[in-house]
Image: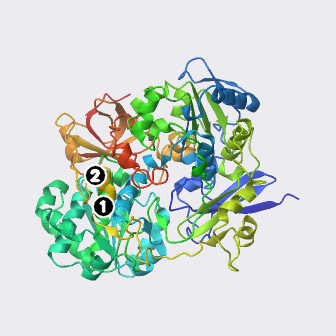
Amino acid sequence: MLTRQQVKTLCPMNCHPTYCGMVVETEQNLFKTLKGDRDNPDSRGFLCLRGRASAEIVDNPRRLLYPLRRLGRRGEDRWEPITWDEALSLITERIQRTRRDRVGIWPGHGSIVMGATASLIMRFGYMGGFQIWNSAINCWALGAYGLALTGVLEAHTKEDMAAHAQTIFIWGANLASQPTTGPALIEARKRGAQIVHIDCRHCEASRQADEVVLIQPGTDAALALAMCNVIISEGLTDSAFIENYTLGFRAFAEHVRTLTPTWAAPITGVSVERIRQLARIYATSRPAMLMMGGSSLFKHRAGWEVSRAIACLPALTEQLGIAGGGFGPRHGALTHGTGFANLLAIEQRPAGSYIPNHMSSVVSAMEAGQLDVLFLLGTNILSSYANSGSLAQALDKIDLIIAHDIFMNETIRSCADLILPGTIWLEELGLKDTPGHIYLMERVLSPAGEAHSTGQLLRDLAQRLAIEDYFPWPGEEEFLDALLEPQQDAQGQALTVAKLRQLGGFQARSNLSPVAYEDRHFHTPSGKIEFWSEQAKRVGLSPLPTFTAPPVSKRYPLQFRQGRTLSAFHSFYDEGQALPSLARANPEPELWLHPRDAAKRSIVDGNHALLYNDQGQVRARVRITIDIQPGVVWMRDGWNELNRLTSGSAALSPAASDAINPHTLPGGQSAYDALVEVRAVAQEG
C-alpha cells in the first residue's frame, strides 16, 4: 500500500525577515503537493503566490539536471553534456594555472535558499584565498550602513509591534517583501495604532495605512532632517536620554536649525504643515515604531544618508529600548538575541590582493583583467547588478565563468562557459532563522538528475584544491549542529538537528528580546547613539547626517525607481518565467506612468512604450495610474536589460565603504536610480 508522507520545511523565496512555513506531501520519493504550515509561529499557514508557485519548481521541464559546456561563442546559447568529473577537473586545472586571488565568487540569493549554505560559501572563499563578495551590497547593506553610523542595527519583532506600537511609520517599506508582517500591522491597527505610510508610490502597504504621504524619490533624508528640526525646535526631545545615551546632540541641533519644513517642502513635495504634523505625531503619539524598507529605499547614490537621518528620530524622543518603539522588522536587520555560530574563517584568509565589497571596484577589476575565473552561484547577475551594460562588457574579459543554478537565465545564456546543475530546496538539508525562531529545513526528495548542492560542489572543489580543514565535520548534520551551537534548548543544552526534529522542526531563538536595545548599548564605537560620527569623519564623510539632492536633467526628466511585487522575487527562476504561475502574473515588464506624463507623451494605457536614456532602453507595457507621482516612473525589479538604465555610480568610496565592517557590513553599493524618458512605440498587430 502506498503511503504519503508530510514533511515541514520553509518557502525557498528568501523574503527575509519573512520565511513562510510549508508542509510538503510526498509519496515514494515523488512530490505531490505543498501548502502553508498552520503550525509555523511566524507565517501561521500563509503562503503568497510566490510560495505556492514553488510547487512548479519540482519536475519542471526547464530545470537544469546535467553539467553542460558551452559550444561556440558566448551568447550563442549552444551546449554539450559533460560529466561532473570532467567539469571539476577543468575548473581545478584552470584555478591551478592562476593565482587564487584571480578567482572570484559572486553568490546570489539562489545559493542561500537553505540559509546555512551562506557560511559554506564565504568559508570556501576566505580559506581558499579567492575573491569572495558579500552580495548584500546590491541589496540591503547600504541602508544598514547608514543605520550603523548612527548606531541602530537591531529591529523589534513583529509581535512587539502588534502588541505595543501606538504609531507606526511604514517608511519606504513594501509588504511584498515581508508579507507575514501584514497580520501584525492589522493587529496593531485593530488595537488603535495609527499607521502612516511614506513612499514615492502607493503600494500594498498603503492599504494598511491611515495616512499615505507621497514623497519625491531620493528625498527621504530631507524629510527626516526637517522632522528632527521640528522635534528640537518645539521642545519635543527627551533631554535625559540625549544626555545619557547620545553623542553630538548640540552640533546636530545647530546643524538642523536651518533644515526647516519650509526648506524641505519644495524638495520632498510634502507640504510644510504636513511635515510639522508628521514630526508631532511621531514625537507625541508614543510609542512610535519606524518600519523602514530593506532595500529599494536606499538604492540611490545617497541611500545611506536616508537611514542615517531617520535613525536620529527615535534617539531624539527616547523611543529606543522601549516596547513598541525603535525600528520594526526589516530585511537584513539584526535581532536582539542569539544567532548562529560564526564559521566563516575570515582570520584564515591568506595574504592576497583582494577586491573590496564595492560594486564599482568589482566591475573595474574585471575590466582591468584581474579575474581569470568567476563562479556565479545562484545568481542572474546581469539582471541584479547596477549599470549592467558595463558589467556585461567586463564579464567578457574573464576566461572561465562557471554558473551553478537550477534554471537557465540571461546571465548564463550570455556569459557562462560551464553550467553545473544545482539542487532545489526539497533536495537538501538546511537551517534558516527568522527574527524570532530557528527552523530546520528537511530533505524531502532525492536530487533529480545529476544535481549537486552548493555545499557538495564546494566540498568537492576544496578536496581537489587541497583547501585543508574546509569541511572538518563528518557530515551535513554535524555541520548544522556546529552552526546551532550557540542556541540552547529548554534544558540549557546546545540545540542540535536531532533536537529540532523532536521539537517539530523549530524553536524560539535563544536569549530573544522582542525589544531591541533594552540595555541601551548601541552599535557604535562609543556604544551610544552618534549624531556626530567620528567613524564617518575619518573616511571623508560628514560627521553629521546630511541630505544630497538627487540629480535632475532636462533631457531625461523622469525619475526612475524599481522595487518588488508579491508576484515576483527579483530575477529568481529566469525572471519568473520558468514558473507558469509567476509567468502568468508577470508576462512582461510593466511600467507605471502617471496620467499627466502619459498624456504629455501621447501614451495609451496597455500599449507598449520605450523607457530609455543614454545607457540603455527597455520595452514595457504601460500601466497608467495615479498610484505613481507625476515625474516618476516605476517598474518591478529583476527584468533583463532594466539595470542597463541605472547609473552604477558608487554611493561611497572603497575606503568609506569599509569603515564599519568591510566583510559583514560594507557600504559598497552602486546607484540603482536613473533619469529617463519614455516614448510610445508602434504597436504590434
Q: Distance between the residues labelled 2 and 1?
A: 9 Å
Q: Which residue is drawn at 44% across and 47% down?
A: 137
Residue 329 placement (x, y as % from top left): 44, 66
Label 2 with label 1: CB-CB less than 8 Å: yes
* Label 2: few (<14), some (14–19) or many (≥20) C-alpha neighbours in 10 Å: some
Report which residue position mark 2 lands on.
Answer: 541
Q: Name the N-terminal-most of marks 2 and 1.
A: 1
**Quadrant including the N terminus:** bottom right
* Label 1: few (<14), some (14–19) or many (≥20) C-alpha neighbours in 10 Å: many
Q: In this view, does 617 lie to the left or right of 571?
A: left
Q: Foreground residue, 59 or 367?
A: 367
Q: Foreground residue, 207 or 437?
A: 437
Q: Which SS class for mark 2?
A: loop
Can I make out residue 146 in this image?
Answer: yes
Q: Which residue is drawn at 71% across and 48% down?
A: 469
Q: In this view, does 641 lie above or below 43?
A: above
Report which residue position mark 1 lands on.
Answer: 533
* Three-letter amino acid code at the position of disc 2: Leu
**Quadrant including the C terminus:** top left
Residue 526 placement (x, y as % from top left): 37, 68
Can I make out residue 202 in this image?
Answer: no
Q: Which SS class for mark 1?
A: loop
Q: Which residue is drawn at 70% across and 80% down?
A: 491
* Three-letter amino acid code at the position of disc 1: Ser
